[in-house]
């Protein structure tokens, strides 16, 4: 009778603190004291087993059969329809001991500290203009109370952006912008913090009043008030722009800060995982397979596996290798696509990118700083970075690096 049962789990464990992803059946065998407890129990069966998407870009449906649990929104207990389709075959992705010669190590850096010159300068003539487009900014808004989940049109009112512009003087905008840049860079400033802040206020003020801010609208460009509104609405974008320009002109050196517990990581650290996506076995990678997310990545992986300039490579998938960058005041992480070790002993961080937008430029600037800091440290060999904008340019990138 019970020969097909694999596990019996105490119902107490289903109420809290338990997050197994392989539950297919839940049967209530005792009275439930509250509806909330029913929801908690059923919730344990709603954890997805797989997060792989199908060809349509959506998750495949998964089901759990529930018996004896009085969950009010369920029309019936159990299921009378056809059983769910069997899961797709899974490929195990793991380091292969027989391919240990292709192990790749990298410095595990949590951030790059920039050491600045004691006196800040910013040549506005060399700073690329920043374009503010009112059509990309929220210049009108309406506010209404929410009643029963919907806005009440009877109390609808405009948010007066002109009033906001009147309230914030230009000097206030300059001070707030300088303060945010100061808070980002304060830990890296070795001199007087007061002098640092005073210099920032002067530089930001000159930038705000300069022609480096371009308004892409005749209507907004001809009015100081409208210009001020656009600056307020795009303050994070302006902060990012000034900060990048200051870093480029005033840094003395960049110092990598390593993870104190794991200063060095390698492909051997990757835990085995499973995927139903298409995979290809590799010859020059310590990891068993390359998981194919696109035909473009498949082509790049094939070239890396066959090119004579490549000693070893690995796709950055479940490795934990990331580059920290700051975009509009928010610290984020991004994961380059490949790490390559060349025959000449150098390393290449390869990014596959079809279009270069402002976010991609910020990522690549942080990647360049990472490479510069690691090479200045000198303890991890020579590192390079490159962006492949089409499959046909990868061989030229590899040959250019290997021929040095």
Image (cartoon, rainbow, N blue to C red):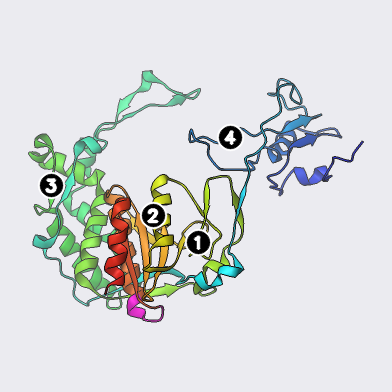
Q: Earlier in the sequence, mark 4 or mark 2?
A: 4
Q: Secondary structure at mark 1?
A: loop
Mark 4 — residue?
A: 60
> Residue lying furthest right in this view?
1
Q: Residue at x 53, y 57 (%)?
A: 318
Mark 1 — residue?
A: 320
Mark 4: few/some/many CA within 10 Å (<14, 14-19, 20+): some
Q: Are marks 3 and 2 in contact (CB under 8 Å)?
A: no
118 or 83: nearer the viewer: 83
Answer whether residue 205 is magenta in the image: no
The nearer-to-camera label among 1 and 3 is 1
Magenta residues (range): 375-380
The nearer-to-camera label among 4 and 2 is 2
Mark 3 — residue?
A: 214
Q: State how far apart marks 1 and 3 are (Cα).
A: 40 Å
Q: Residue at x 22, y 76 (%)?
A: 117
Image position, residue 305 (x, y; %): 44, 61
Q: Quadrant of residue 329?
A: bottom left
């Amino acid at each position: 009778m019970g020969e097909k049962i694999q596990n019996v789990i105490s119902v107490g464990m289903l109420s809290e603190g338990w997050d197994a992803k392989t539950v297919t059946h839940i049967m209530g065998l005792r009275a439930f004291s509250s509806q909330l407890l029913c929801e908690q129990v059923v919730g344990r069966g709603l954890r997805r087993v797989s997060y792989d998407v199908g060809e349509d870009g959506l998750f495949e449906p998964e089901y759990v059969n529930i018996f004896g649990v009085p969950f009010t929104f369920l029309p019936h207990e159990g299921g009378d329809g056809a059983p769910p389709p069997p899961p797709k075959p899974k490929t195990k992705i793991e380091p292969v001991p027989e391919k240990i010669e292709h192990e790749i190590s990298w410095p595990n850096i949590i951030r790059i500290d920039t050491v600045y010159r004691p006196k800040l300068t910013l040549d506005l003539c060399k700073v690329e203009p920043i374009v503010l487009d009112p059509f990309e900014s929220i210049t009108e808004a309406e506010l209404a109370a929410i009643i029963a989940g919907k806005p009440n049109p009877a109390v609808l009112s405009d948010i007066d952006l002109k009033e906001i512009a009147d309230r914030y003087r230009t000097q206030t905008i300059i001070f707030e912008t300088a303060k945010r840049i100061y808070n980002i860079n304060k830990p890296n400033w070795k001199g007087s913090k007061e002098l640092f802040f005073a210099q920032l206020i002067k530089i930001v003020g000159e930038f705000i009043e300069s022609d480096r801010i371009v308004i892409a609208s005749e209507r907004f460009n001809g009015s100081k008030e409208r210009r001020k509104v656009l600056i307020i609405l795009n303050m994070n974008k302006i902060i990012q722009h000034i900060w990048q320009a200051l870093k480029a002109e005033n840094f003395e050196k960049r110092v990598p800060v390593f993870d104190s517990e794991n200063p060095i990581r390698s492909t051997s650290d990757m835990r085995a995982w499973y995927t139903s996506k298409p995979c290809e076995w590799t010859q020059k990678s310590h990891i068993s397979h390359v998981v194919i997310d696109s035909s473009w990545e498949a082509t790049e992986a094939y070239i890396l596996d066959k090119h004579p300039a490549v000693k070893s490579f690995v796709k950055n998938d479940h490795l934990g290798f990331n580059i920290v960058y700051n975009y509009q005041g928010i610290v984020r992480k991004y994961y380059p696509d490949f790490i390559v070790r060349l025959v000449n002993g150098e390393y290449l961080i390869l990014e596959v990118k079809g279009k270069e937008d402002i976010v991609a430029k910020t990522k690549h600037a942080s990647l360049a700083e990472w490479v510069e800091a690691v090479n200045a440290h000198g303890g991890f060999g020579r590192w390079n970075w490159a962006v492949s904008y089409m499959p046909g340019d990868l061989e030229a990138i590899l040959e250019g690096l290997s021929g040095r």
